[in-house]
Each structure stands twice: as C-alpha cells, then as structure tokens.
Image (cartoon, grey):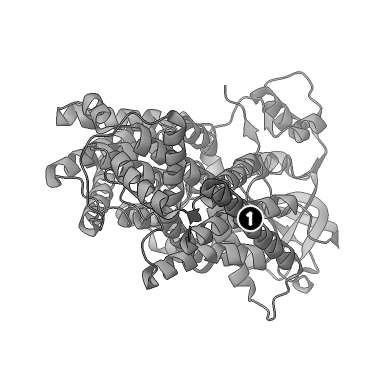
Amino acid sequence: MIFHVQQAIRAFILLAFSVMLFKLHFSGEMTKFINPKYEGLSQSASVLFLVLFIIQVTRIWTAREQDHLHHNNCHQDAHDCSHDHGDSPFNTKKLIAYLVIVFPLATGFLLPAKVLDASIMDKKGGMAVLTNQRISNEEKKETNIQEFSAVNPEEIGSSKEITKEEYEQLKQNLIESTTIELNDDVYSTYYDEIHLDVQKFKGREIQLKGFVYKEDGLEPDQLVIARFLITHCVADAGIIGFLSEIPEASALSQDTWIEAKGFLDTTTFNGTELPVIKITNWKEISQPKQPYLYPISIRIL
Amino acid sequence: MNRILRNHVIDFTGMVIIGFALMLLTLSTRFQMPFKLSPSLLNLNTIFLSILIEALPFVLIGVLIAGVIQVFVTEEHIRRWIPKNRYLAIMMSCVIGALFPACECGIVPIVRRLVGKGVPIYAAIGFMLTGPLINPIVIASTYMAFGNDIKIASLRMSLGFFIAIVTAFLVSLFFKGHQLKKTTGTIHSHSLSKKEAFSKRFWDMLIHSIDEFFDMGKYLIIGAFLAAFVQTYLPAKALLEAGSGTVSSVAIMMGLAYVLSLCSEADAFIGASFSSLFPTSAILSFLIFGPMMDLKNTLMMLSVFRIKFVISVLAFIISTVFITIMLVQGFI
C-alpha cells in the first residue's frame, strides 16, 4: 500500500471548496457575492465538489501493483491525456500551483465579505456615469403604456421573475402614485422610468434609502444617495443613485446609510439635466441586510 | 483481504480529511484578523471571490464535459463527424459553437480535449469563439440590457458569428498541427479498447475531470485575481476621458472587455452602462470581444497551447474585431 500525499492534498482542496461554498450559503454571506437568483448554481457546484472529493479519496491509497495497472490503463484509454495526474514527483512549480489554488480558500475562509462601498463607486465612474444615464435614457424610445388588469405590487415583489404585463403594470403604478416609494424590488424599474422623463415626475414625493456618495464637483449641500445593481456577481455591479440636496450634507460622511424623504426636482450638473431630490427629512440607518439591488427579470417567452 | 483492508484505510482517510475541513470551518467562524486590513483590500478580495464563485459552476461543467470527451469520444468519431473540407469544417464548428450553450470559463478545457482527440485546430477555435458568445441566455440578457431593443442583440450575434468564421479561417491559414504544448508523457496512438464496462469508463471520466480541474483551476484563479485588481484600483474615469474618437473609444472598450473578464451572460449590462459615453460601435466591440477572449481565458489557454499560438490567436481576434467594427460603423 502506498500513500499518495498529492492525492490527499487534492482531496482536501476539493472538500474545502465544497465546504466554503456551503458555509457562504449557510451564513447568508453568499448574497454579498452573487445575485440570489444564481444561488442554485453555486449550490450545485458545492455538491459537485463533494462528489469529486468522494471519488478523489479512493486515489489516496493504492496497492503497488494496482497503481501500475491504473497507470497503464490511463494511457491505453486516453493515449494523450496530457494533464498531470498528481503522480509525478513534487517540485517547486507544483508547490506554487497548489498555493495558488489554496489562496482563494484561505481568503474565503478567513476574510470577511465586504459590501462594496463609495470607493468602488468612485472607481466605476461616479457622477460621470450617473450623468450619462440620463442622456442614454433620452435616446430610448418611449414605450406605449397600456391598461392592464390590476396587479398587486406585493405579489410582484415576491416573485423574482415577472411577465411583461406585470412589468407594464409596475410602471403604471409609478405614474399613478402620488408618493413614490423606492423599495428594493421596484427600485431599478422606477429609476429607469424617472430618468426617462424627469419632467413627468417633478414635484412628486419620493422615499428611498441608500448610502452616501460624494465626490469633487458637488455643491456643499449635495450628495448622492447611491446603490449598487448586481446582475450576476459583484464584479459586474452597476452604480445607480439620485443626486440629493440636504442642508446637512457636509456633516454626512461617505458610506453612511440613510433613509430619506423628499420631492423630485430637476437640476443641471455639468450641463446635463438631472433629477434631484430635495430632501425634507432623513434619518441614519444601519446597513440593510440586503445592501444590493437586483434587476427585475422579465419573462420574454 | 488486501482489498478489504484498502477500503477500510480509504474510509478512514476520508474521515480524517472531513475532520480537518470541519476544524477549518469552526476555526474560520471564530477567527479574528490579528491586524486590520485596508478596506480596499477587502473590496479586492470580495470581487475576486465573487468572480470565482460565479465561474466555478461553469468550470466544473466544462471539466466534466472535457472528461466525457476524453473517455467516451474516440478519434474515429471525430474523423467521421468533421467534414474533410476546411471551409465546411469551419462553418460547422461555428454553428455547433452557436448551438452549444457554453460559458467562456468552461470552454478552454473542452477545446483542449477536442484538439487532443484530433479535431483540427481551426475548427476548435471556431467552436471556442462562438460557444460563449452566441447562446439563448446571452441573447436574452443583451436584449434586456439595451432597453428591450433587438438591434444591439442581433448585431452582436451576427457580427460575432462573422468574426469567428474569419478568425478560424486565419488560424487555418497560419497553423498546422494541434498546437498543444509538448508534454513529458509519451503520446500513444494505439486504438481504444472498447471492452471496458460503462461504470469503469464513467469512473475514469470523473477522475479525468478532477485532474482537469486542478490543471485549469490555477489559471482561473490568477485571472480572476487580476480582473478583480483592475476593478478595485483602476478608475473608469481615466478611461472615459481618454476615449473621444471612434478609434480610441473602440480600442478602450476592447481593452476594458479584456481586463474585466466578465461572464458573457452579465457583460451586456456593463456594456449598456457605457452606452452613453461611447458610440454604439465601441459598445459592440466590447460585447463581441469580451466573450471571445479575455485575461482569464488567455491564461487558461497559455496553460494548454503554445505561447506563439495563443498570442497569434489573440492578435487575429483583436484585428478582426477591430477591422470589422470599423467597416460597419457607418451603418449602425
């Protein structure tokens, strides 16, 4: 009987990946990495790793003659299986390879997941991108809004995927409402609509939450109440946010989460017309459990 | 007797490893960093892990398919399936790629196995280019990201298909042979014995998948880390200011697609967020070039193919995308 150290290391790495994914799901930290819609995928990855681990375990111990047999088999089976089977002797190159693979396991287990903050917002372009969302939306054609049977907004919120009718209904709700309440489920839809035609919503009362983002070029009483929109994982996070006017803006520091109420108005920023919220009252809140927004997916077929 | 003993020893070893992993789990929940890491490093780590977590399911699917090809597909199959005519073979590979719902994270191991089994290198490249770019999920996400407008989505698919064919053709002109890295093991060419039981071959397939994962895993991890690094430390503003003309904006968007290494299913939304800053042609170059080749993929390819080949393919793709976009920009 021969003990193969490398096969044992590989088995351990496979199991560690499985456990890490499982741990992130179990602790709920997974939502800080990916859109919950895709959680099923990484859960199946976790199960797959476990299966691969069970298979790998059988390779740790081999009888001497069996080892030889397997080796021959492999080359008969797969005349040019050009990859490393973990049988060749250990060297520095391999050590580096294993260290690279262990690296994400170490940081995944030991470092806490961080919610993206204002510094990332700045790297992603900040106001330059926000200002341009306005222009790009102007170019989009107005879609005709028709009457649809009433849909309960709460129902929309609970299901992650909605039909086209429900989506139109959602937009209709926005147009009819006197107070716009930007909760997480409707945020991105309403955001697009408001940016499409600011004038239509001028003077409406609006309620929202987000974190404070500031950059050079904003007035002392201005700040952005910002959010990140995650399509798939945080690497593809997009930034959205409303320019807001709060007299106490200078007292609020970056990354403070606030809940605010105010009226929609328009302003010009660097020559572009932008919606602005004149905040009437606000309060500081702790970072919500689900800090990110996810786009509503509309069933096309 | 020996066999029973071995089984027991294996059970025991498995148990010990599970014990280790559980210990790691409990340790990690109580672990406090002895020093405070800067927030930007934590941001970097979060983005890095998220790319990895997003890619892992697709990589696993990729290595499993690679395992299936390795064990169940023989060279005779390939010889029968692939047309002798070069042009037909390129067309066919691109169409199969378009029908095959792959993600770019998992495509390299599949391509490597195909080439190993005797698929001509140009056909394999055609498959690699259309696989991640043209599939239902990408079409749907592009359609949605650009305000439910079919124009960008259809341009992305049709131009992408054309570029893939041209690139595969260029590869067929300049490269012969399989272009795989030389391996230390001798390459046998005797035919496969079909006597073996299905369960044995299935087991072999899984073993191959594991080895493939360890081969590819390190390059995926390095690629994900570099992409996360760029996202955390490179300000987009610098890019935005640099891109004013069509040529420079196309170049910038292609560079961005390369370093960001986004998943082809999510990149449409990022591309859309730039649609105000850059002309449509630049956005299209981002959407087409990204799924075909990126930082993460280049590293994975370098682990499999010769350096000269990888760099040439990269150059072919870049020039074809660039020239095509420049030619059609007047019409879009």
**Snapshot quadrant of residue A89:** bottom left
In this rendering, would B22 be left or right of B175? Answer: right
Query: B151 or B303: which is nearer to us?
Result: B303
In this rendering, would B22 be left or right of B272? Answer: right
Expressed as whole percent of the image width and height from the top left, the position of residue B68 reads 40, 36
Q: Determine the chain carrying the residue at label 1.
A: B
In this rendering, would B251 be left or right of B62? Answer: left
Up/down of A210 relative to A175, above or below: below
Expressed as whole percent of the image width and height from the top left, the position of residue A295 reads 64, 41
Q: Residues within 10 Å of mark 1 (few under 14, many from 20)?
A: few
In this rendering, would B77 be left or right of A16? Answer: left
**Snapshot quadrant of residue A155:** top right
Expressed as whole percent of the image width and height from the top left, the position of residue A248 reads 80, 69
Residue A294 shows in this picture = yes
Up/down of B24 relative to B148, above or below: below
Query: A15 or B125: which is nearer to us?
Result: A15
**Snapshot quadrant of residue B107:** top left
Residue B230 shows in this picture = no
Quadrant where the C terminus of chain A sits is: top right
Query: A254 or A100: which is nearer to us?
Result: A100
Q: Residue at x 19, y 44 (%)?
A: B171
Up/down of B93 relative to A125, above or below: above
Q: Could you say whether the residue bearing mark 1 is in a helix, strand or loop? A: helix
Q: Name the kind of residue labelled 1 in the image.
A: Phe
What is the residue that sits farthest to the front in this orientation?
B1
Q: Residue at x 65, y 54 (%)?
A: A19
Up/down of A91 relative to A231, above or below: below
Q: Residue at x 57, y 51 (%)?
A: B5
Expressed as whole percent of the image width and height from the top left, the position of residue A266 reads 68, 51
Q: Which residue is mark 1?
A: B12
Q: How many marks?
A: 1
